[in-house]
Image (cartoon, rainbow, N blue to C red):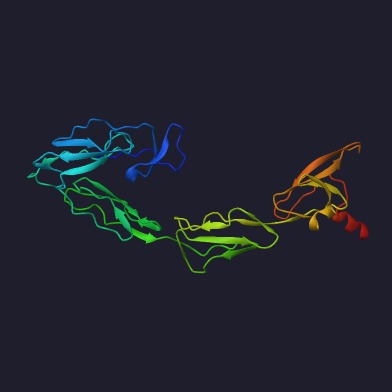
Amino acid sequence: MTGHICQKSCERRSCSRSRNCLCDGHCGLSCISPGLSCPWPVMIQNAETQRAKESNMFGDLMTVMCKPGFSMPDGEDRAMSRCQGDGNWSFTAPCEDIHHPLSLCNPPPRTENGFHEDGLFTIGREVHYWCDYGYRLEGASSLVCQENKEWSHPAPTCHAVNCSRPPNVAQATLVAVHQSKYPVGTVIYYLCKKDFYLDGSNRVVCLENGSWSQLPHCRARCHISAQRSRVIYHGRKLWINEIPGGLVHHGETVKFFCHSQNKTCSFEAESHCFDGVLPLPDCYDGETLHKIRQQTI
């Protein structure tokens, strides 16, 4: 593989409008210009080239075939080459005379629960390692074949990633198999208790970094503390005693009627229920449960 210059890394939809987030080999997801192409035709010493299809755009493949009496440095007579995000083909090494001495390292050491790049391990070649899903890499993520035909570092190791016991959520019941640790990808659920409103997703996942995805909240209903008043709720003008229990759900809006300072007109003032608290508007001068209790003392 020739030197591969990685483009700007990305996540889905995080590139500028002029670029797309696409997989670029060992570089991973990268910002790639639409219409990117690699040079064609390609002249490779002692070899012929053939495109897999009549295209040399990003991601397209080309077959490199050695002429009779020549071979790749690894002894093969052909190889596949891919158009990379840097505008170069991934493999353009010349074919050598079959009697040419090779300078190769032995295949790099394998790592359990992980894998590395395959191909020709010539002097100077850098080989990258990755871990399987649910495992974290520790150690050098790449090794280099040195002039002494030894690898520059020991192979990295891949350790399982787990999440600890999921945290409690107030006023919620956890639905999960109880265990001391949870593998990456484990899904658990939270169910809010009666009369509490779910704020967020009830589905929580153990992430690859060993943490849980965002937890939900269970929000309490709000009691309307105004008394013997009319309000606007769900677009209807109602007496408070027409609302069951005088309770509204988290996130709902209640409109109260306020009077101007000289009492010549009235207007609406909104209040929003948030986790058990529904503040009365400052302008509201009607009776409240607190006022009634004070009058009876």
Can residue 169 be seen by looking at this rendering? no
In the image, residue 78 above or below residue 175 = above
Left or right for 202, reference 8: right
* Image spot of residue 146 (x, y percent): 20, 49
* Image spot of residue 244 (x, y percent): 79, 57
Left or right for 119, reference 37: left
In the image, residue 285 above or below residue 33 = below
Indicate the quadrant where residue 82 lies: top left
User: Residue at 24% across / 52% down in the picture?
Assistant: 152
User: Residue at 88% across / 52% down in the picture?
Assistant: 228
Q: Outermost residue, left direction?
A: 99
User: Residue at 85% across / 56% down in the picture?
Assistant: 289
* Image spot of residue 202 (x, y percent): 58, 57
User: Residue at 88% across / 58% down in the picture?
Assistant: 293
Quarter occupied by the N terminus: top left
Left or right for 61, reference 29: left
Left or right for 155, reference 68: right
Number of on-image labels: 0
Indicate the quadrant where residue 78 lies: top left
* Image spot of residue 21 (x, y percent): 42, 39
